[in-house]
Amino acid sequence: MGNKPTTYHAASNENLFGTSPKVTEALQHTLARLNSYPIPDAAELRAAIAQKLGVGAGEIVIGSGSAELISLLVRAFCGPASAASILSLAPSYPLYRMEAQALQVPFRVVPLTSSYQVDTDALLAKIDATTRLCFLCNPNNPTGTYLPQQELERILRHLPPHVILVVDEAYVEYVTAPDYGDALAFLHQYPNLVVLRTFSKAYGLASLRIGYMVAREELIQQLLQVKQPYNVNQLAQVAALAALNDDGFLHQTLRATLAGKAHLEQALQRLGIQYWPSQGNFLLLDAGIKADVIYGHLLRHGIQARQTEDAYTLRITIGQEEHQSHLIYMLENLLNPTNLCQQHPLLAQVVETGTTLQEASAEEAAGAIERLAAAASTQNDAQGRIALAFARAFAARNQKASQHAGNLYSSTYGMMDMIAAFNVLVNATPLVTFGHRFANHLILSAIADANAVYLLDLGIGSGLQWFHLMEQLAARPQGAPALHLTGIDIPAAEGKPDQRLRETGMRLQQQAERLGIAFTYTCIATKLEDFDLTSLSINPEQALVINSALTLHHIPDQLVTEPDLRDQVLYQIKALRPRVFTLTEPDSEHNKLDYLPRLRESLRHYHTVFDVLDTLLPPDMPERQVIEQEFFGREIINVVSCEGSRRVERHERNEAWQRRLVRTGFRPVQHPDLAPVLAEELQLHSEFSLVPNGAGYTLYWKGTNIIASTAWVADGN
């Protein structure tokens, strides 16, 4: 691509288009006065800002960047002797948390939604008597998403007077959204509102560290009590004043940033890299592969990106054309199928074929799919069989036919074949049993003192999980409790809707009779989103536990429908206040990613699953064909070929599930280290590992995450 340009500093959201010439000129005139202290209250700069914003100079305080002002707010309103806490969003600017931790102030977060929007109801619900500061970054860093005016006003209207809302508008100059929530519009209406702005971004003064805060004068006076008199140096004050008066350079910067963002967005779309619309001078990216792989590749080629708290996302600052062209070239090089799948040529052909579907005619795509299927048929290993599964998925996408994909009970195989295959999957691999055993350990602990238990299983299937639990209950020294089980699952595709669930109940009844357990059973054949869990009649004397294994990802969230039905089910679970809620889900993202990054993610996930099956099951076992091409093959067809509401296999990564659960009012259950116990019970192959994830464990195979099992309790329990 010719000579490589100088290092692309795309990590810190600086103004990569430079600084106003008027700033450098003003600084030259100031150098002769370096022996003097700066103006302690930055009066001239405050007056200029006040005039520009239409506020009083006494409503402004200047800081050494927004960072100092954030620190001053924490010190002024969350002193070490007070019972104070701080609330913010996640993911967001990390300095809020860092300042809270530095002063040992409790810090809580409300995670953003699937589309990185603020959940206003969840935010307001999280506020309590201890909340003193609530930091909202708008537009938000690192997502670039923003809080609309209507939602900002709703937060201010319902915010208790003891809570100060700090709206950090570091990127406000870049905003083009007409409904953006400009906090200054509410300044004189709400005395508990603080607005932070900075000269580090659009004005290009990052190295001089200068920002400002706007608030009611009485609040400013409280802050001045902890501010040092000479906190902002004179060079920074002079530079900020010159930058503020150069509208021409500011507008030039904003035009260049907007054009650069549009250029980068077009390239990312072509490369199949997910990005989220941003109101800042940066974009958040997800290519469907681990972010550290991309980060390391870019760094080796002179591009400094920003890693986030999420293992799969990177933040890139908009830069000049030569830098962005270099970035695009390097991303294209990394994501080339041959480079991406160096050790597996057939998997590279899978990615190439999937990409062809985006670019070629239906006839050309059909030819590529046929070539992939032919190549897959010559290779009877994990790579060959996964390639065949993806060839079928590509054919369905090319024909725009879902073929009942995602419904395991709609199959050309007979029911007995499906049950036999599922038994093999359960007994010969830990892919299902891992979640069962972890959940059972947490459930047994939660009901240790109970004489009567109500077990609610969301997605009961064949109920195999509960055979083991019943054995453990029967072995209790004090005897087994009376057990009621309510099993919910989707209706059968043929025959009576609840026939399969009734058969599950009969098998469980027989197990209970063998073990001498008083057992009752209720089944409900319905989609979870169509049923109100709070309508169940649960005796208060029964210890309630709720379990969901490989089910909740079928429920659509806000990316498909409003209201968010996935959240709605979680809120119902919270309302029931179970002693424990156990959740097992594949650790993969097939919900919010567009087609090409979703293809890369799904290939990683399902290739790992097929490699497990290739290792643990005999090559000629007929049940393996059903497991691979029916169970997981149907999932692959749905993930790859379906969009919108037709895609029911909407897995989320464990990080996303945990953010969702925290946002809807849950916290992880504390438990002892169960990894050694689980490894022994499951007799795990040496290539498996169990890694703590903060709420349970994630099962890994050869260093790649497959499935996560976690345990939760409603806040306040």
Image: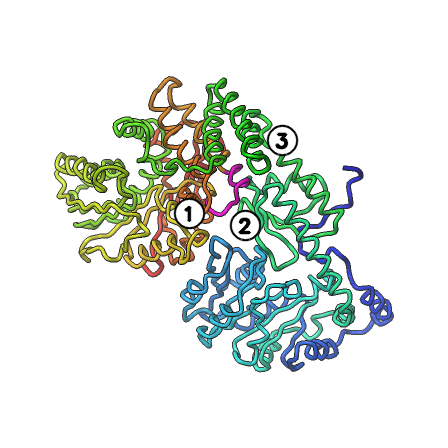
Q: Which residue is drawn at 64% across and 40% down?
A: 296
Which region shows up in magenta? 591-601
Residue identifier under label 3: 339
Residue identifier under label 2: 309
Q: Residues within 10 Å of mark 3 (few under 14, many from 20)?
A: some
Is 369 placed above or below 526 here? above
Which numbered disc, 2 or 1, marks the residue that appears first in the sequence?
2
Residue identifier under label 1: 645
Give the foreground label among 2 and 1.
Answer: 1
Q: Does the magenta stretch include residue 449?
A: no
Give the foreground label among 1 and 3.
Answer: 1
The x and y percentages for residue 458 are 29, 46
Q: Is mark 3 on a helix, strand or loop?
A: helix
Locate residue 565 relative to residue 505 in the image: left or right. Answer: right
Q: Label 2 amino acid?
A: Glu
The x and y percentages for residue 593 are 51, 45
Quadrant (top left/top right/bottom left/bottom right) for the N terminus: top right
Q: Is mark 1 on a helix, strand or loop?
A: helix
Is 617 placed above or below 465 here? above
Q: Is mark 2 on a helix, strand or loop?
A: loop
Residue nearer the viewer, 708 or 97: 708
Q: Residues within 10 Å of mark 1 (few under 14, many from 20)?
A: few
Q: Residue at x 23, y 36 (%)?
A: 467
Quadrant (top left/top right/bottom left/bottom right) for the C terminus: bottom left
As measured in the structure, the alpha-carbon distance from the residue carrying label 1 to the one carrying label 3 is 33 Å
Give the foreground label among 2 and 3.
Answer: 3
Which numbered disc, 2 or 3, marks the residue that appears first in the sequence?
2
As measured in the structure, the alpha-carbon distance from the residue carrying label 2 to the one carrying label 3 is 26 Å
Residue nearer the viewer, 497 or 601: 497
Is 614 placed above or below 396 here? above
The x and y percentages for residue 606 are 46, 33
The x and y percentages for residue 512 are 15, 38
